[in-house]
Image (tube, helix red, strand yellow):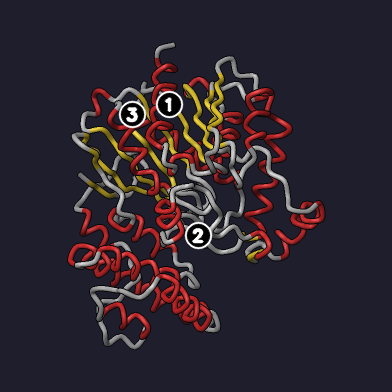
């Protein structure tokens, strides 16, 4: 079952048909092959199956993006809005009717990659509403998951995209898990993880950061991770108001783990948190060169959105499962461009804060890391475990595993380790 809606000040959800919400929300593929405003999309409008190699499609998409980049953004805004409003409906039909789902997914991915030059968050928000884009199951076996797609407006007037996976029987829900994804990805990638937690009686609530997934902001750009922390605290408050007296946990991956840690340190009411689960947290983050650390704060003010190609990690080996890599880096909602200067600076700043304040971590936590992680340092997790003041803390280092633990071959084993830890916290 799937419902969508906008969160109102009173804390209630306005729910309606999923397909109506998708049609009224936004989109990126025009169904009319006669469009003069976005002519390059005629190819997709006239094609039900796409068989071009992925590399060739990306080349075409980037070529289109280069041409679009010379056009003033203001001239693209109105046709962009028209494009987003008219196209998701087509994308939705494409997935439902295409004889080749992988071809349809590829067409959608290319269209979004090309249109990212305009960076219209409405496009991403519309895509995020369609679970089929990522091919993630909403139910596993006999476990029925109700997926709710909602949003809220933060203090900066940005619309934040959220989605939750709720067990069929909310009366027996024994815990709430606030999910914080990693840098450049989005909450929808964790649908399988959420379904496994649902099977054990946990509700999962994911929020896309600003500039990520379906939330407002330039794709891949984070103006301030402190703002993400504030958004997380606001979202937690909203979730707990809907489900009072239910124990709360935070799950964070990579930079999301660092955000979870800072949220727990700054939480005004730490008793509301039963614990924090961290996978591959970005605790010990170091610049590639000392001069980068010295110049980053300056350039983050002068050229905050500039893409620093020297820091690009597109295609980084984050899993030993090749299918997981293909799924991640062909996902239209995953940002694969070079790191933007302000975003990189914020990661360094958050890492420096945590390094100085690890002793202030008092919330119970479980930290998990792959010994062969090439993105974040496993020694950072060891340092967290050693220095944190938490009375209840556990660490698990998985020999030979890489960065995206929940997308490794051993993901089911790791998920069960997480569930056992959550259950143990509820028994105390």
Q: Quadrant of the C terminus?
A: top left
Of circles 1 and 2, the one toward us is 1
For this rendering, which residue is in front, 414 or 387?
A: 414
Residue 201 percent coordinates (x, y): 29, 26
Q: Quadrant of the N terminus?
A: top left
The residues tagged by marks 2 and 3 sit, at their Cα atoms, a distance apart of 29 Å
The residues tagged by marks 3 and 1 sit, at their Cα atoms, a distance apart of 15 Å
> Quick one: SS at disc 2?
loop
Q: Is residue 367 left or right of residue 406?
A: right
Residue 220 percent coordinates (x, y): 54, 58
Disc tally is 3
For this rendering, which residue is in front, 59 or 247?
A: 59
> Quick one: SS at disc 3?
strand
Q: Residues within 10 Å of mark 2 (few under 14, many from 20)?
A: many
Q: Which residue is mark 2?
A: 335
Tags 3 and 1 touching, CB below 8 Å: no
Mark sitting on residue 401: none
Q: Which residue is mark 3?
A: 202
Residue 299 vertical placement versus 262 (above, below): below
User: For the point 40% across and 61% down, which residue is it?
Assistant: 124
Residue found at the very far front of the displayed protein: 400
Q: Is residue 182 left or right of residue 13?
A: right
Q: Which residue is mark 1?
A: 417
């Amino acid at each position: 079952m799937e419902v969508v809606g906008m969160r109102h000040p009173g804390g209630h959800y306005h729910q309606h048909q999923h397909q109506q919400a998708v049609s009224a929300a936004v989109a990126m593929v025009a169904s009319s092959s006669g469009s003069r405003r976005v002519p390059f999309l005629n190819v997709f409008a006239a094609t039900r199956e796409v068989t071009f190699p992925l590399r060739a499609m990306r080349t075409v998409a980037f070529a289109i993006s280069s041409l679009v980049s010379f056009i003033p953004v203001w001239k693209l805004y109105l046709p962009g809005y028209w494009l987003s409003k008219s196209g998701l409906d087509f994308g939705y039909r494409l997935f439902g009717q295409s004889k080749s789902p992988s071809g349809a997914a590829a067409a959608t991915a290319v269209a979004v990659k090309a249109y990212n030059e305009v960076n219209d968050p409405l496009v991403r928000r519309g895509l995020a509403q369609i679970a089929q884009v990522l091919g993630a199951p909403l139910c596993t076996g006999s476990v029925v998951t109700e997926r709710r797609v909602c949003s809220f407006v933060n203090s900066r007037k940005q619309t934040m995209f959220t989605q939750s996976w709720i067990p069929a029987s909310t009366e027996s829900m024994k815990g709430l898990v606030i999910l914080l994804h990693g840098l450049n990805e989005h909450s929808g990638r964790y649908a399988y993880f959420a379904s496994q937690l649902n099977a054990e009686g946990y509700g999962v609530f994911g929020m896309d950061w600003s500039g990520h997934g379906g939330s407002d902001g330039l794709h891949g750009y984070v103006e301030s991770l402190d703002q993400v922390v504030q958004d997380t605290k606001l979202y937690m408050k909203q979730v707990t108001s809907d489900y009072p007296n239910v124990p709360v946990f935070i799950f964070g991956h990579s930079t999301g783990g660092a955000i979870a840690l800072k949220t727990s340190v700054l939480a005004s009411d730490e008793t509301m948190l039963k614990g924090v689960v961290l996978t591959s947290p970005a605790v010990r983050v170091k610049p590639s060169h000392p001069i980068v650390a010295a110049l980053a704060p300056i350039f983050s003010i002068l050229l905050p959105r500039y893409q620093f190609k020297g820091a690009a990690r597109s295609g980084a080996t984050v899993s030993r499962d090749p299918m997981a890599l293909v799924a991640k880096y062909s996902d239209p909602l995953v940002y694969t461009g070079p790191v933007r200067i302000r975003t990189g600076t914020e990661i360094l700043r958050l890492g420096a804060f945590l390094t100085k304040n690890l002793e202030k971590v008092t919330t119970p936590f479980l930290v998990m890391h792959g010994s062969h992680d090439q993105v974040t340092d496993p020694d950072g997790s060891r340092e967290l475990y050693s220095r944190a003041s938490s009375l209840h803390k556990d660490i698990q280092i998985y020999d030979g595993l890489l960065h995206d633990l929940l997308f490794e071959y051993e993901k089911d084993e790791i998920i069960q380790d997480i569930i056992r830890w959550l259950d143990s916290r509820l028994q105390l």
